Image (cartoon, helix red, strand yellow):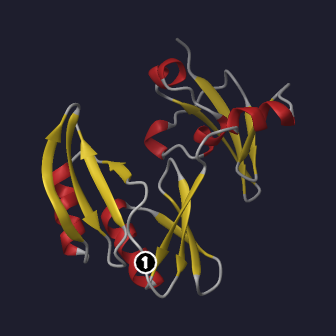
Amino acid sequence: MSEFGITCLAVGVAAVLSVASPAAAEDFPATPARQARLRPHQIEESPEKTAVAANSEMTYEGDTEMTRREERDGRIEYIEFLTTDLAATKTFYSAVFGWTFTDFGPDYASFEDGSLTGGFATAETVQTGGPLVVIYAVDLAAIESRVKEHGGSIVRETFSFPGGRRFHFTDPSGNLLAVWSE
């Protein structure tokens, strides 16, 4: 199994990168959108396959626009939450999970978690219910402690399920999420 590299253009600066995990190439397809969001520990220099990232789109030599759209077809690319306090929400998710934020005016901020992007829109109230967003953590206890420390509330204590353990929490605005680990 071979490694592959990408040439990433970001803010006019080019860097040569590659995916260091051979398993990811076969067992979990490294789509262009996923490669564009790799974390530093997942990247290693390799000149084998070159790609260009521009505007969050990755293009391989010979790819067509239709091929890139087909790869994205039917996949979740963005998730939005409501928040009653945008500043507190950004502080909470930065401190607990290490997410980074980009502000788009006083009432909206997008986030990146290294895998998925999304946003928080300011609202007067947050209604719970609907799909449950589940976040993976290597150290479940450490994340649970940080959730409590930064103003979140544990609404379902850690429990076992086939495949692992998880707990449910609400963030400072009342959004219900879960965290799981093996």
Q: Residue at x 39, y 82 (%)?
A: 88
Residue nearest the viewer, comparing 49 with 160: 160
Where in the figure is residue 50, as x and y percent of width and height? 73, 29
Q: Residue at x 13, y 47 (%)?
A: 159
- Left or right: 116 in relation to 141: right
Q: Quadrant of residue 64?
A: top right
Residue nearest the viewer, comparing 77 with 146: 77
Q: Where does label 1 land, which residue?
A: 126
Q: Residue at x 47, y 55 (%)?
A: 113
Q: Is residue 108 above or below residue 94?
A: below
| Number of numbered discs on residues | 1
Residue nearest the viewer, comparing 117 with 59: 117
- Left or right: 129 in relation to 169: right
Q: Residue furthest top?
A: 1
Where in the figure is residue 57, as x and y percent of width and height? 73, 45
Tag 1 secondary structure: loop
Q: Residue at x 33, y 69 (%)?
A: 95
- Left or right: 13 in relation to 174: right
Residue nearest the viewer, comparing 145 with 7: 145
Q: Is residue 22 above or below residue 16?
A: above
Query: In what quadrant of the picture does the C terminus appear?
Result: top left
Where in the figure is residue 22, as x and y percent of width and height? 48, 20
Where in the figure is residue 65, as x and y percent of width and height? 85, 37
Q: Amino acid at mark 1?
A: Val
- Left or right: 4 in relation to 81: right
Q: Badge 1: how crowded within 10 Å, few (<14), some, or many (20+)? A: some
